[in-house]
Amino acid sequence: MFVEYCVGLSGLVASGLFIYGLKAMSSPVTAVAGIVAAGYGMLFVVAATFLNLFNITPEARPNLLVNVGLGVVALLLGSLWAGWRGRTVQMTSMPQMVAIFNGMGGGSAAALAAVELLGNHDIPLLPLSVTVIGALIGCISLSGSLIAWAKLDGRIRKPFRFSGQRAFNAALFAATVVLAVLTVMRYATPSAELPRDLFFGAALLLGVCMTLPIGGADMPVLISLYNAFTGLAVGLEGYIMNDPALMIAGMVVGSSGTLLTALMAKAMNRSLTNVLFSNFGETGGSSKGPEGEMTAADPADAATTMRYGASVIIVPGYGLAVAQAQQKLYEFVKILVAAGVDVKFAIHPVAGRMPGHMNVLLAEAGVPYDMIYDMEDINDSFATTDAALIIGANDVVNPEALTDKASPIYGMPILNAYKAHQVFVIKRGSGTGYSGVENPLFFQKNCTMVFGDAQAVLSKMVEAVKALGST
């Protein structure tokens, strides 16, 4: 009785810490404390799992030592590898790591369902149906997240599309549902195990086929969606295992992931079905190419202009993360601020490769939170600012989204950087962004390109403004 009381109490405490941790993560100021709190919640759950071994049935005791040993080995390997990767991962690889870790959560839920379905004991219809649904969602999250990881890591460089792909995916989904129903019906005829095995294979394939055609610009939304899938699958399996902590954690992750997915899709002015099935980057019309020529400038000239301006808004993009130049950028910003320049950072909801990517990047460099503004809070300020500095961003500042109905990004809200009196763009080359869409901003008369690696360019800018201070 005492053990059962402790296990139940640990689940309640863990659930409370999970919810508090998620709430705290909504603000950069309290995010670290939230992560630590959620970590303690997970520690309570793991401890309760081992404590619950004292309640094991006599029939299961012969395998107790083996199971405990396997659990300890898995816990040590997972903790060591995840801890090492968490400490050594580069900011450019953070989206890939999030995708792969998220996939492991979905895979775990699918594995729990597989264990239930491989058993020979009778399962009531409702729990059995929930198990199969959890297996379906977990499998999709696992295989889909693995493909997302490959895309983010550059192992799959282009969306994979073919004629009739949507019809094929619809047929595959229908077949998977039929196999799921047959898997539930299998318990009426235990010898028919083939539907169960085919169901898992079809569910994994469905996750792959859903993800392959989705373009790079939709990756932040996709990662958020699979995060919601993983939470939902974990919550369902928690119900099957009668584990309140697992249910609560899964429901919290699933609901927050769903809300974040909706917000991300709204930020792109697209529905979720449009994200999943529209083949982003393909249009029915013909978009006109940009007119004019790009104007290039030396980093020192760009830095000098910003040094003697009254206000600067900085738009960070994935190129900043690739160059690992966030520290050098903040060094440049501190010099501008010391000279009396009003500097702000503008963050687009889908900037980078995952939700919140740019916020994490700037926090890593030590940028104060009160200098960072969301799109809706700063967009009106571009028209009155002296200079906008865009670093490695493309699609989120593309004015074509506002004007060209033939463009695949038409209707997507953007940062109005093009309205600034002067726009400087640090970019390695003149190519397109992640979505493959050309940006006419780079050809405007008020826009100047500063070509080069962001780390090298910002270093030269720092040197230039320091020299101005000594003269």
Image (cartoon, rainbow, N blue to C red):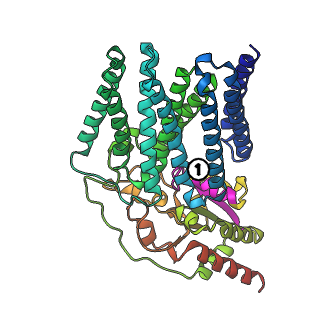
Q: Is residue 384 left or right of residue 112?
A: right
Location of residue 375 with respect to 132 vertically, above or below? below
Q: Which of 311 and 462 is in front in this view?
A: 462
Q: Residue 279's spot in the image, x, y percent?
A: 32, 49
Kindly give the residue lying farthest to the bottom in the view shown.
471
Specify the amino acid type for callout 1. Answer: Gly
Q: Can residue 249 be seen in this view?
A: yes
Kindly give the residue lying farthest to the front in the view shown.
62
Q: Mark 1 points at which residue?
A: 356
Whether residue 314 appears in magenta in the rendering, the answer is no
Q: Nearer the viewer, residue 290 or 105?
A: 105
Q: Residue 318's spot in the image, x, y percent?
A: 53, 61
Q: Which residue is drawn at 54% across and 61% down?
A: 317
Q: What range is drawn magenta here?
A: 341-364
Q: In which quarter of the image is the C terminus?
A: bottom right
Q: Which residue is drawn at 69% across and 61% down?
A: 365
